[in-house]
Amino acid sequence: MADTLTTPRQIVVAVVGDGDPRGPEAHRVLEWAEEVGQRIARGGAAVVTGGLGGVMRAASRGAASAGGYTIGILPGDDPQEANEYVRLPIATGLGVIRNLVVVTSADAVVAVGGRHGTLSEIGLALRMGRQVVTLGSWRVESDQRMGGPRVHRAHDPREAADLALRLAKEGPVRPST
Amino acid sequence: MADTLTTPRQIVVAVVGDGDPRGPEAHRVLEWAEEVGQRIARGGAAVVTGGLGGVMRAASRGAASAGGYTIGILPGDDPQEANEYVRLPIATGLGVIRNLVVVTSADAVVAVGGRHGTLSEIGLALRMGRQVVTLGSWRVESDQRMGGPRVHRAHDPREAADLALRLAKEGPVRPST
Amino acid sequence: MADTLTTPRQIVVAVVGDGDPRGPEAHRVLEWAEEVGQRIARGGAAVVTGGLGGVMRAASRGAASAGGYTIGILPGDDPQEANEYVRLPIATGLGVIRNLVVVTSADAVVAVGGRHGTLSEIGLALRMGRQVVTLGSWRVESDQRMGGPRVHRAHDPREAADLALRLAKEGPVRPST
Amino acid sequence: MADTLTTPRQIVVAVVGDGDPRGPEAHRVLEWAEEVGQRIARGGAAVVTGGLGGVMRAASRGAASAGGYTIGILPGDDPQEANEYVRLPIATGLGVIRNLVVVTSADAVVAVGGRHGTLSEIGLALRMGRQVVTLGSWRVESDQRMGGPRVHRAHDPREAADLALRLAKEGPVRPST
C-alpha cells in the first residue's frame, strides 16, 4: 500500500523579514517580498513564513497569487492570527522561539529587509544548517574561516528567488558550531 | 484579489501516542491509531502527528489511505526523518518541545495508548486549551473543579474519532491556569 | 586550580502549582506550598519555581524563611517579574515552555494543587525522568505497566517534602517514551 | 518578614562563544574568554554561559578564580554535563533553544570568537533587547537605521568586560522588531 500513498517531498523556502516595515524603505521591501514569494511559488516550492503581517503577508500573497502553497508558523496559539494568504496555519504557542521552526522547516531561507527579529532568524538558520539569501537585509561576517552554510547577498527579487530555489534543492549543510 | 486567493481554514486533529509500542497491547494500539487516522480523514480533517513511528506512523497511514492530508511535526532538523505517510514534514529542531507544537497546531487531540511522552502531550494540550480524547491511554483527574478543556475517554476508534471531530469543530477553549 | 574552585552539586527540588489559587482550597494550598518550601530548604536543597505568584511565591517564601536558596525560572524576559523571595531570577523569554525548564532544572518535583499548567509540568517532569510528588494535585494513572519515574501521592507537606528530598537524592530515572 | 528576606538583584553577564575552538585563533580565544570572565566577576556580576566546554568553560573558570558566581544553562537534561567551574547548573532539555535562555537570563552579553551557534546567540540577544559586546567575533550590520540594542566591538578583554558591565547596569533596551 505504501507505494501508492507516499508522495515526493516538497521543496520549502522560508521568507523572513519585518512584520511591520516602517520608514522610507517600507514600500520597496514589501514589493520585494511579494515578488520573491511569487517567484518561489512559480519555481515549484512552498513558501513558509511566520504567518503574520508585513513581509510575511506580502510573501504569502505573492506565492498565493502564483498558485503556490503557503504555510504560516505562528507564535501564538490561535490559527486565526494567520494572514489571509496562509493556506496552512501552524499555531505553535512558542512565542519568539517559533523563529527557529520557521527556518528549520525550510530547505533554504530568504531574508528581505528586517530588524532584530530577522537577525535572530538568520543566525538560527545558519545554526540549523540552512543557507540564507539576503535582500536589503543584514550583513553578517566573521573573521574566522569556517565551512557550512553562509549568507548570500542578492540584489533584486529575481536573483534572491533563483538563488534560494537552487540552494533549497541542494538542501541543508552541516553548520559549524 | 484577496477574495479569490483566500481559502477556508482546514480542521486539524492531532493523534499522539507511543513511538514504539511494546507489550501485549502494541498490536491493538497500532490498529486503533490507524483506524482513528482513517476516520478523521474521512471526516474531512487533516491529521497532525509527531511524524515518526509507532502510533504516529499508524495514524498517518490511516489518514493517507482515506486520501487525507497528513502533517508531521518532527523533533529534529531533517524532514527525511518523517515516516512515509507524512505529506508535509515540518522539521523543528525543538527536541522534546516539538510536543507543544503538535498539540497547539491542532483543534483537538486524540491520545492512543502512550507512555510518559504522551502524558506530557495531554498536559500541554489542556494547557493550550485543546480538548483531549483518550483511547486506552492515561487517566488524569483533579480534585478541583475547574472550567476549560478536559479529557474525554473513548472506548473504541470510532467513538474517539467522532468525538475528536466534534470537539475540533467547536474549537479550542480557554484553559484554567 | 580546579580542585579548590569546584564545588559539590547542590540538590534542587522544583515546587509547581497554581499561580493564582482560587476557591475554597486556595488558602490551604498556599500554606502547604510555604511549608513544603521551608522543609525542602531545611533539608538542604535549593527550591526552583516558575518565579511568579501563588504557589510559586509561597514556596519561595517558605524556603527563604529557612535560609534556603531560591531560583525563579520566568516565562518573560524581565527578571523584575520575579516575586520578592526569588534570589536568582532566570528570565527565559520562553512563555509556556519555561515549564520544561522548571522541572528539568530540578532533581525531583513537588506539585501542590494546580490546574492545567500544573498538569503540563507533571507530564513534562515524567517525560524528562523526574520523579513527581503530588499534594492535593492531579491524579494520573495509566493502564499500561511501565518503568521509569512516576507520581507519588503525599498527604501532608511533611510527607511531600521528605519524599521529594529522598527522590531528589536518588536522582532522575530513565523515562518510558 | 519580606524586608529581611528579600535581596538585591544580582547583575548577570552572559559570555557566549565556541564550545570547541579550533584553528590558529583557538588559544587566544580561550585566554580572552577566561580574562573576560575574571574581569566580570571582579566587577561584581555573575557569569552565565551555556555550561559546556571551550569559551563557556574558560569564562566560567575565570569567574570562579575571582570568586564569582557561575551559572550554566545546559542544552541537555543532565546537570552533570556542566563543566567543573559551573556553580549552578540549569539543565533545560531545550537543545539548541537553550541559547535563548542563556542570553535572556543576562543583563548584557559578550561574544568571544564563535561560529554559527554564536551568531544565533547574538541575534537572539538583540531580539530580546540585550546589548552585545563582541571580541573577535561576528560583525553584523544593517542598512536600516533602527533603535534598540546593538553590537559594540571591543578590542581586548578589558574593554569587553568594562563595556559589558556598564551596559548590564543600564539594563535591557526595547528591541526593534
Image (tube, coloured by chain):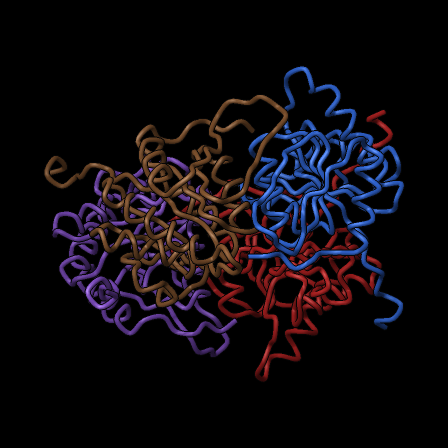
Chain colours: A blue, B red, C purple, D brown
Q: Is residue D165 shown to the viewer in this render?
A: yes
Task: Residue lying at the far front in this picture: please name it.
Answer: D24
Please state which of residues B45 and A56 is positioned toward the viewer in this rendering.
Answer: A56
Measured as percent of width and height from the top left, residue C26 is found at 27, 44
Task: Check the image and name the residue furthest to the top.
Answer: A24
- Residue D62 coordinates in the image, percent (x, y): 29, 53
Comparing D110 with A91, the one in front is D110
Identify the residue at image location x=73%, y=19%. A27
Q: Position of residue B25 (x, y in %)?
A: 60, 80
- B39 over C94 or under it: above or below: below
Residue B167 is at least partly visible in this image: no
Which residue does the image show at 58% across and 80% down from the upper left?
B22
Front residue (pair A163, D88): A163
Judging depth in this view, the residue of A171 and A2 nearest the camera is: A171
Q: Quadrant of the N terminus of chain A?
A: bottom right
Q: Residue furthest bottom?
A: B24
Residue C69: where, in percent of width, then height? 20, 52
**Residue at x-position 65% and y-position 77%:** B28
Picture quadrant of residue A121: top right
Q: Quadrant of residue A49?
A: top right
- Whether residue A160 sits left or right of residue C150 in the image: it is right
B3 vs B90, left or right, is: right
